[in-house]
Amino acid sequence: MNKILEIKNLHIHFRHHHQAVKALEGVDLDIYEGEILALVGQSGSGKTVTGLSITRILPPSAEIINGEVIFGNQDLLKAGPARINAIRGRDVAYIFQEAAASLNPVLAIGRQVAESIMLHQNKTRKEAWDLALDALTQARLSRPESIMRSYPHQLSGGMNQRVMIAMAIAAAPRLLIADEPTTALDVTVESEVIGELLELREKFNFSILFITHNLSLVEKFAHRVAIMHRGRIVEQGASRRIFASPVHPHTRELIDSIIRI
């Protein structure tokens, strides 16, 4: 398999009251074509910052000290604003934890998905509308025509998350970054959303960086797992190997916590 993304020796600090807080310390991470890589860590470990740094969606207090993010033979940390904006949402798409917070509450779903398509693709409004309807159908939303006319507050959490998946896949990305995409959902809906996401990956052959605090969640579907702890990746490898013979003490702690549950 070919690499589609390489993160090399990435260091990111946050400035807080004239002090530097080290968020990432020398992160190295590769993602391959068509694979699912789970990035697992506790709150504050740096996993979300890692995902956001790929297309530089970082707050003003963040400072990239060192490192490279290679995508398409280009270091995205050195790319200009026009290039980053072209990649973000098209080649690299995101799904975040709180779907409702990512959607505009005063715009209908259809308009939001269609405008996203028009932003990243050279499509007319009619073409974008038809593609939005198709994307909602692909994301397994029942009555997609009705959903197109609905507003986020009229939909359940699971439905809004499916809308975010539809918006992401409509751009035909090479990499989908899913940051705690099911944390706000109940167990049944979580299982359904993950199943649908995996089906879409099979159909469209994009890679997934699945970011989560829940190691047990990714055991059945991740090809590889990377464990983050205090701003570093302390262990990574094939999923079966990680669960069968963890090396780092923090990985063993996470796995032991699954057994106790």
Image (spheres, rainbow, N blue to C red):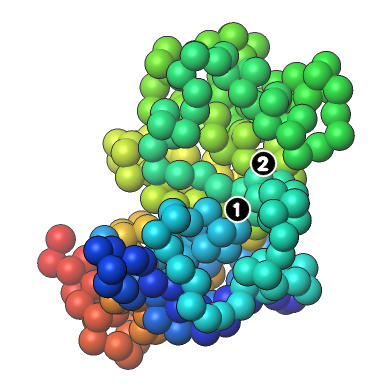
What is the quadrant of residue 190 in the picture? top left
Residue at 69% in and 49% down: 85
Q: Nearer the viewer, residue 145 or 195?
A: 145
What kind of element bears circle 2?
helix
Label 1 and label 2: CA atoms lie apart by: 8 Å
Place of residue 141 in the rendered image (x, y in percent of width and height, measured from the top left)? 56, 24
Residue at 51% in and 44% down: 95
Q: Amino acid at mark 1?
A: Leu
Q: Residue 78: tell me if it is visible.
A: yes
Q: Are marks 1 and 2 in contact (CB under 8 Å)?
A: yes
Q: Earlier in the sequence, mark 1 or mark 2?
A: 2
What kind of element bears circle 1?
strand
* Mark 1 lies on residue: 176
Place of residue 39 in the rendered image (x, y in percent of width and height, measured from the top left)? 43, 67
The 10 Å Cα crowd at callout 1, few under 14, some 14 to 19, many 20 or more, is many
> Which mark is drawn over residue 169?
2
Q: Is residue 118 left or right of residue 99?
A: right
Q: Amino acid at mark 2?
A: Ile
Q: Is residue 18 left or right of residue 96?
A: left
- Identify whether 35 is placed above or below 96: below
